[in-house]
Image (cartoon, rainbow, N blue to C red):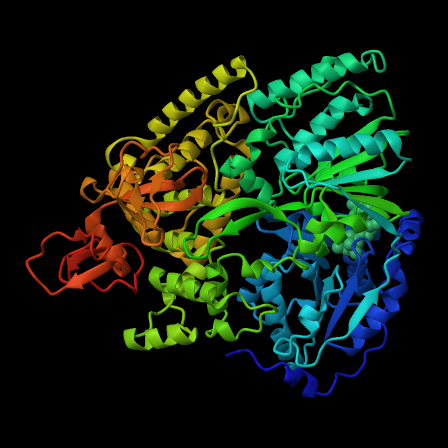
Amino acid sequence: GPLAPPAAAAALPRPPAKPAVFVPVHRSPEMQEERLRLPILSEEQAIMEAVAEHPIVIVCGETGSGKTTQVPQFLYEAGFASDGGVIGVTEPRRVAAVAMSQRVAKEMNLSSRVVSYQIRYEGNATEETKIKFMTDGVLLREIQKDFLLRRYKVLVLDEAHERSVHTDILVGLLSRIVALRAKRLLPLKLLIMSATLRAEDFTQNRRLFPTPPPVVRVEARQFPVTVHFNKRTLEDYSGECFRKVCKIHRALPAGGILVFLTGQAEVHALCRRLRRAFPHARRRPPDDGPADTPEETRRFKKSRARAQKAQAAALPQISLDSYSVLPAGEGDEDREAEMDEEEAALGSDLDLDLGDEGADGGEEPPDASLPLHVLPLYSLLSPEKQAQVFQPPPEGARLCVVATNVAETSLTIPGVKYVVDCGRVKRRHYDRVTGVSSFRVSWVSQAAADQRAGRAGRTEPGHCYRLYSSAVFSDLEPFPPPEMARRPVEDLVLQMKALGIERVVNFPFPTPPPAEALLAAEELLVALGALQAPPKAERMQQLQRARLSCPITALGRTMATFPVAPRYAKMLALSRPDGCLPYAITIVAAMTVRELFEELDRPAASDEELAALRAKRARVAQAKRAWAGRGAALQLGDLMVLLGAVGACEYAGCSPQFCEAHGLRYKAMLEIRRLRGQLTTAVNAVCPEARLFVDPKMPPPSEHQVTCLRQIVAAGLGDHLARRVQSEDLLDDTWRNAYKTPLLDQPVFIHPSSVLFRELPDFVVYQEVVETTKMYMKGVSAVEIRWIPALLPSYCQFGPPREQPPPAYCPERGRVLCHRDSVFYRVGWPLPAVQV
Ligand code: ADP
Ligand code: MG
């Protein structure tokens, strides 16, 4: 393969040392003064010497020491961006890529054309770009286009301690690319930056780095933080946070408060509660995110009215009108925020009891002490609103930032003296075997808890209040598991195969993913036709040795160029004939955004609200039925609804009003539009003859096109096939109206929000199974049994040639039985796996 052993780099003679370059930067004196206070400035020389002498350098330093903002500037000044070179910096979070590019541009007095960012959906990089911040996924895709990454003279992998999957893979790949570039006398420097002292993951891994790279440690100017544990560990950590902040604010000396909660909904609830309790500092309209439903607007208005009464005397100039309610989706460009977004998307049970108007509403009397300046911080928050946390609070007020995990290492908030840590973090949990995902609030690791505590000691000695007992702390796992160990890896395996890495198990991962995850990925990709199936006999053996190494197919190569998960990529790859591409692109875009419809199954605070919710639910259900259509269209199910909703919305000019009226998330709609544009470009690149153009509007698909789309969807989601349990094999009452999938033993059901909820087709494919009160399939589409042998041969058992009886499902074998010479539909681009 193209991967040479890294030892080659060490063996080569070092290129002659270049004379020191110094590229001047014209910073403002204030900026320069601010920089000089950062601990990393005293390590500039050590870092740059290490970079000059070694191809790979690790920089370790506490959060806030200046790694992200300063190291790119050191490199710039040392000439790494002269002669057309680019300094690349990767971040696991989009928030950080955007915020840091803006900050560095400002510090260096350069425009965003020169210090730019690139995230999946957008960027402002130009020909002039010299420092480019990007998400790690973006760089991974660039490697696909140019394995040697010739544009870059130096790459900085930031936040390597986060152990995001993409950063982990980049570390592995770049360890080899650095060696290859040295061979070609085009040296590439690599810096790995990490916030914790756990550099051993990288330095101790001999497969990754046979010669351990040098580590430059930045001494943090950290003040002591006194950690206080609660005696008892309460379940209601949100309420406990509230009480703790009140106590701190009333009793303790000046200094900012930083609260760690787990998700956007919790953050909002606590912000509102605190603002009600300490209403003085509300000099601005509530800006903790858009009120995107009438209920929320009403809630905003109510609490606003209450706050207003309280502050009428103090601030008579504020009238109700001066609080304009932000339009839904205002400014939220950032798509990172997996957690926040999907929390909203899944309408998870987690949010249900967070309604603030109920249990705790209004019980706290307004307080007369110091003003409290309450600000939310989470990744979906717009950059402008995020920037507020860096501003000093209004004169005489105390800053209180209520944040999710983003404040742990990615963003450093100045002036924090008190940290209130709920000790929990929200993580997406995947079940490896079944593919079921759910959001779980789980305990943080000890390392994360210490990181959070450390936020209190940046400017002076501080205090950290842990809302759990010290016994709980000592039971926490020392470090969080790397993301690689927690999520499916099929997209990565496909990417790596496309890069020519056939034996993925041999890849120098910093922490290899579990062998069964690699196997599951490879199996899925074989089933999708993206990898060549190994001959049967060999396969068993290979499986046992966990050494599958199927080469990529032409279809797989095409799939790898689309920036979506393999199942969706396959749909795109199949959609060329019959003008289906624009529709497939729309469906895939809508599915990738995950939840287009607003969550309407939430508890209402009042009868009036309940009535409004019910009315809206009915209206949305009606709209969904209309979009689903009848006959063939209805069989495409929820995906037809997506198509119809996007089409209808675009015809109506994609206005917030239309979305609001039809229960659609405006933000999601904008993202779909953006992704459609991007996917259209990607398809045109693979298949210029298709000559697609980006037109948000499109006529509804013809009946023939709908049939093709159903097959395309079935082929893409093939491993998510479910069969309705027939009355004769009903096991017991829990199986009424249930479906059986190959992987799950339990019954699964069509989600009540699905248009096929009452249709109950015999075979369906689904986008995902979500576990709430039951196992529910979402994104359901009906499949005809006669398509299954052609589209999903791995679910079939083929008999000897006969007179073509129709394929039949055989419950004992759990398979569809059919015959080899039956005639089946052919779909789209060649399907190498289909041999019927
Ligand atoms: P590290 O990467 O080591 O965690 P950073 O380079 O992110 O540190 O931050 C260095 C300093 O710059 C911190 O004190 C932080 O508060 C400050 N800073 C970062 N971004 C901004 C911003 N947008 N506005 C003001 N200060 C900022
Ligand atoms: Mg940083």
Side of 1 where 822 appears, left or right: left
Q: Residue 22 falls in which quadrant of the image?
A: bottom right
Side of 473 where 591 appears, left or right: left
Can residue 112 be seen by looking at this rendering?
no
Name the residue rendered at 55%, 15% in the picture: 606
Q: Is residue 360 above or below residue 567?
A: above
Residue lying at the far left of the rendered structure: 803
Name the residue rendered at 22%, 46% in the picture: 784
Name the residue rendered at 59%, 32% in the picture: 329
- Percent across and percent down for residue 810 are 18, 53
Q: Nearer the viewer, residue 332 or 216?
A: 216
Q: Nearer the viewer, residue 442 or 830?
A: 442
Which quadrant of the figure shows ligand 2?
bottom right
Q: Nearer the viewer, residue 584 or 371?
A: 371
- Percent across and percent down for residue 513 are 53, 65
Q: Residue 335 falls in which quadrant of the image?
A: top right
